[in-house]
Image (cartoon, rainbow, N blue to C red):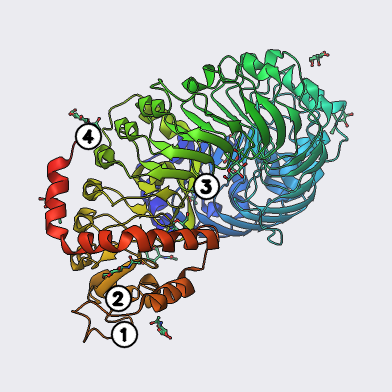
Amino acid sequence: MTIVILFTFVVELINLNNLEVLIVQENRLNGSLQFKDMTNFSSLEILDMSGNAFTGILSPYIGALPSLKAISLSQNKLNGPLQLHTKDLGMLKKLEELDLSDNNFERILPPRLGKLTSLRFLDISKNQFSGNIPSFVIASLTSLEYIDLSYNHFEGLFSFNLLANHSKLKVVQFKGENYRVEDDNKFLKVLLLPILQENIGKILNLQYLNISRNHFQGNLPSSIGDISNLEKLDLSNNYFSGEVPTKLFFNNSLRVLELNNNLFRGTLPDMVSPAGRYLGILDISNNGFPGLISKWLGNMQILWSLDMSNNFFEGQIPCEMHAYILIDLSHNWLSRLSPSCADLSIIPHLFLQGNRLTGLVPKVTFSVSFHVVTLDIRNNLFSGRIPYEVGELSNLRILLLSGNNFSGTVPKQLYWLKNLEIMDLSKNYLSGTIPHCFRDITFGKLNATDDFDEQNAAADFGIVFVMKYRSYFYKGGILDIMSGLDLSFNKLTGEIPLKLGQLSPILALNLSYNQLTGFVPTTFSNLTQLESLDLSHNNLCGEIPSILIGLHFLEVFNVACNNLSRKVPDMKGQFGTFQNSSYKGNAFLCGPPLEKSCTRVDSSPPLPRKSLTTSKGKWCEVDPLVFSTSFWVSYVIFFLLVLIEYHIYRCYYFAFNMLRRQLNYTCH
Ligand SMILES: *[C@@H]1O[C@H](CO)[C@@H](O)[C@H](O)[C@H]1NC(C)=O
Ligand SMILES: *[C@@H]1O[C@H](CO)[C@@H](O)[C@H](O)[C@H]1NC(C)=O
Ligand SMILES: *[C@@H]1O[C@H](CO)[C@@H](O)[C@H](O)[C@H]1NC(C)=O
Ligand SMILES: *[C@@H]1O[C@H](CO)[C@@H](O)[C@H](O)[C@H]1NC(C)=O
Ligand SMILES: *[C@@H]1O[C@H](CO)[C@@H](O)[C@H](O)[C@H]1NC(C)=O
Ligand SMILES: *[C@@H]1O[C@H](CO)[C@@H](O)[C@H](O)[C@H]1NC(C)=O
Ligand SMILES: *[C@@H]1O[C@H](CO)[C@@H](O)[C@H](O)[C@H]1NC(C)=O
Ligand SMILES: *[C@@H]1O[C@H](CO)[C@@H](O)[C@H](O)[C@H]1NC(C)=O
Ligand SMILES: *[C@@H]1O[C@H](CO)[C@@H](O)[C@H](O)[C@H]1NC(C)=O
Ligand SMILES: *[C@@H]1O[C@H](CO)[C@@H](O)[C@H](O)[C@H]1NC(C)=O
Ligand SMILES: *[C@@H]1O[C@H](CO)[C@@H](O)[C@H](O)[C@H]1NC(C)=O
């Protein structure tokens, strides 16, 4: 209805026969489009009604506009099949641009679309067109420069041979849905057969081909390397297999090459390739590429981001590797990193997780650089001390060293890392105490002034960090606000430094599975952003400070398997949500949610030691790694000899201790 009113308005104002351009973008016009009444728009060349709320079918009378060159009806709610009247088709012959994207059109594409032989631009993405794409349509539209069929429900076979005569074609987009849901038809189910050998060479002007997230399968035809103007090629998330044709790296201007998430096998071409001249982004992750990492990667002078993760690459990491933003070699079989390899230290985001790298961490690689922002060497076999020089990576924001064989103390120089957001040193053999100076790490209190912010935004990567008992994947902006410290599964001793309470922006703190003693610091009440606090499986004693009730965001709280005593904090605020599992394995804790009431607890509970150990054992045998028999034997002996007195002292001279530690505190 509204549109009719609008047109009446127009009719009264202007001489329609001379109207050449009509743009009514982004209003809230609704109702159906009645092109029947528009026969008088005889000069109309450009009609843009995108971004409104038109509904109903598209009237076939659209063809009655004789001068029309460009129509955009994108971002409306038009539906039904796309109809084109035979009698009007002649008039649409001049049509060069047709944009019907982001509507609800359905059924098959009308073969008559193929009659619009002047079409240069065709975008029917984000609709619900289904069935086969009529080959006639594609084969006839030889003037096409841009075609986007993404996000529909097409299926069946699509042959690139059909594009053989499309010498002007520059951009092809057949992207699928974001998720690879096998039974969901909401993406183009197309099979690419290696039948285009001779013909693809004619598509010489093609610059951009994106057919990611489809069901394409089979080998890549080597002729794909002949598309000499190709700048961006995205074949990711398909079922392509076999080898990548050598030619692909030789004979074109590729700047972006994404082959990730396919079934490619066979060695990558191992030679110095001119392709390196232009390549900015290379992603071959999640395939089955074997063998050594070719030297030619070193020749890519302007490489920006290189992702080779989740393949079967082995042997040495070549020192020549370089990328301005990111290199990801995670989850391969790489075993060596040359100790003198300094070049890697200028890569801002370096991921070497899940390989078989052994020996000492090469100091020269991982120190003295202001470039490094993310360093992930988790789950390798690195051993020895964590070199204190890591503290000199002054722009480091994410340091992930967990799951290695690191031993010795936690270098206190890590507190030099003023920009650190996430530090994961868990699952190593680190001993000694937690450095007091960690409070100087800002953990997310960033000064957003440095040069790397822009690069960070551009780098497309995420990391996994465990909090709230789960592995979370953080990416982009979310990663920026994440901050956490994980020292779990080590052999750390001594007390938890009160100063840790000054890490106020921290969201996750995990000190579980160590041998920490002393109290749960009351200063933790200053960790106001804390969502996840795990202090379980230590030897902490004393009361749980009830002031922690003030932590409004705390979702997970775990102090199980310690030697805490007295009343647990009232079930107020977030503490009302914690179950008795948060407290289990502390024989002297009482009060709800625990079944044990607190009536007689004020005087120290006179439980025989034997029952204490058994009860603790019952709860705490969860992890044989830490609570192994030998550990228990030595623990009990140690306990008998030393700890009793020590603990009595610690637990009863609480105030004095705090004072003493504050006075003695020094970082330098
Ligand atoms: C068109 O929009 C108006 C105002 O938003 C609304 O009242 C009316 O119901 C809409 N008509 C249709 C057919 O959606
Ligand atoms: C088209 O123009 C003719 C005269 O120029 C007029 O009589 C007719 O009503 C117009 N049609 C519409 C639908 O405006
Ligand atoms: C390309 O054009 C040639 C010559 O006009 C024709 O023989 C051939 O069938 C066309 N190819 C396709 C796929 O339409
Ligand atoms: C290809 O399309 C997908 C969306 O389906 C997009 O995420 C990706 O960045 C595109 N690739 C390139 C190289 O532009
Ligand atoms: C590069 O492409 C041109 C034209 O497409 C072709 O003649 C030539 O053989 C190709 N060279 C290689 C090394 O593939
Ligand atoms: C890592 O530590 C474990 C346990 O101490 C030991 O068995 C293993 O040999 C070590 N591996 C390396 C590569 O140092
Ligand atoms: C942030 O900037 C202020 C002043 O610009 C400076 O004093 C402070 O040390 C900086 N903090 C960090 C962590 O770099
Ligand atoms: C703390 O770390 C341990 C070991 O790494 C892990 O099992 C546990 O789930 C973590 N706790 C939380 C609350 O995420
Ligand atoms: C929390 O921090 C403030 C300011 O740094 C300090 O005055 C206060 O004593 C701290 N609270 C605890 C319980 O440590
Ligand atoms: C546990 O704490 C109590 C005081 O609450 C103390 O008497 C006892 O020795 C401690 N036990 C262990 C194993 O540390
Ligand atoms: C924990 O609570 C559940 C019920 O919520 C109860 O069955 C169980 O016995 C309790 N365990 C302890 C150790 O209090």
Disc 3 element: loop
Spatial separation of the CA atoms under disc 1 and disc 2: 8 Å
Pointer 1 and pointer 2: residues touching (CB < 8 Å)?
Answer: yes
Across and down, in percent, residue 502 comes to: 21, 47
Nearer the N terminus, badge 4 or badge 1?
Answer: 1
- Residue type pointed to by label 1: Lys
Q: Name the residue under label 3.
A: 74
State whether residue 107 appears in this view: yes
Nearer the N terminus, badge 4 or badge 2?
Answer: 2
Across and down, in percent, residue 216 comes to: 77, 44
Q: Is residue 440 above or below residue 498?
A: above
Spatial separation of the CA atoms under disc 4 and disc 2: 35 Å
Q: Mark 2 points at which residue?
A: 589
Direction from residue 241 to residue 665 in the image, left or right: left
Nearer-the-camera pick, 94 or 638:
638
Mark 3 within 8 Å of ligand 4, using the beta carbon: no
- Residue type pointed to by label 2: Leu
